[in-house]
Amino acid sequence: MQDKAYYVKGKRDLIDIKNFESIKSRIKAVAFDIDGTITDSIGQIVACTHYTFDTLNIPRVDDDIIKGMIGKKLQEGLISLLEPQYLHLSTKITDVYRQTFIDHDSLHETKIFPGIRELFEVLKSKNIKIAFASGKSTIGIKRNLNDSFLGEYCDSFCAGDEVPSKPDPSMIHTLAKRLAIKENEILGVGDAAMDIQMFHNAGSFSCGVQSGVWSGEALKSVNPDILVPHARDLIELFAK
C-alpha cells in the first residue's frame, strides 16, 4: 500500500455497476460486513482504541492506522498497533478494550446507516438470503442483532472468533454451508480491502462500499465486481 492514509483519503462517491446485470441472476445470498458497511461504528472503534491505550499508558496511534486494522480479529488487530516495547501487553490490551467498550454506552450503540432496512426488505422480496460476515466476535454480532432490527432479517452469520481473520476465505466457506448454497452464489459487501479479497478468495462476487474505512479510489485497486458509495445504493439495483 502507498502511504498509510491512502486507503481512507480520496473520493467516496465512485460508482461502477457495469457488471451487476451479468451477475444478478446468480445471487442467492448477500453477505454483509458489519462495521462501516451497515453500521456507523468506525468512530466508536477508534475512540475505544484510544481509551484503551490511555488506560494502559500506551502512546496513542493515528486514527487512520487504527482504521487499517478494523475487520481483523480484535486481539490480532490491537496487537498490530503495538510498538515492540508494548508487546508484553498483547493479552491485557484485549481485555481492557472489551471492558472499555462495556463501560461506555456511546461505544456499543448499534447505529445503522439509513436505508439498510429498506435494502433488506427488497432482498427478502426477491427471496435472497441475508447473512453477516464480520471480524467481530460472536458476542458482538449477537449484540448487534439483538439491539436492532438486524436480527429480524439474519439468515446466518459467521464471526471472527470462528475462523481465521479476513482475507482468509473460511468465513465465506462457512456461510455457504450454513446457507446451503455455493460460494459463487453469494454477493459479499464490504468497506475494506480485506473484505473484497476474502470474497474473491472464496470465489464469491464482491461489492465495495465507501461508507467505512476505504475510499472509493482505494477500493478500486482491489477490483470489486461492483462499487457503490453506500450499501443502500443496492436497493435500486435489486429492485429492478
Image (cartoon, rainbow, N blue to C red):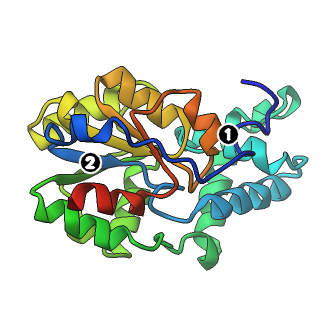
**Disc 1 residue crowd, few under 14, some 14–19, many 20+, Cα 10 Å:** many
Q: What SS does tag 2 mark?
A: strand
The structure residue drawn at horizontal position 38% and vertical position 75%, both measured from the top left corner, is 147
Looking at the image, residue 165 sits to the left or right of residue 220; the answer is left
Q: Residue at x 15, y 37 (%)?
A: 26
- Which residue lies under the disc numbered 2? 30
90 lies above or below 53: above
Counting from the top left corner in percent of width and height, residue 137 is at: 43, 49
Mark 1 residue type: Gly
Q: Which residue is farthest front?
A: 18
Q: Amino acid at mark 2?
A: Val
Residue 218 drawn at (x, y percent): 64, 35
Left or right: 117 in relation to 6:
left
| Residue that badge 1 annotates | 68
> At 45% from the left edge and 74% from the top edge, which residue is drawn?
114
Whether residue 109 is visible here, answered yes or no, is: yes
Q: CA distance from mark 1 to mark 2?
A: 24 Å
Quarter holding the C terminus is bottom left
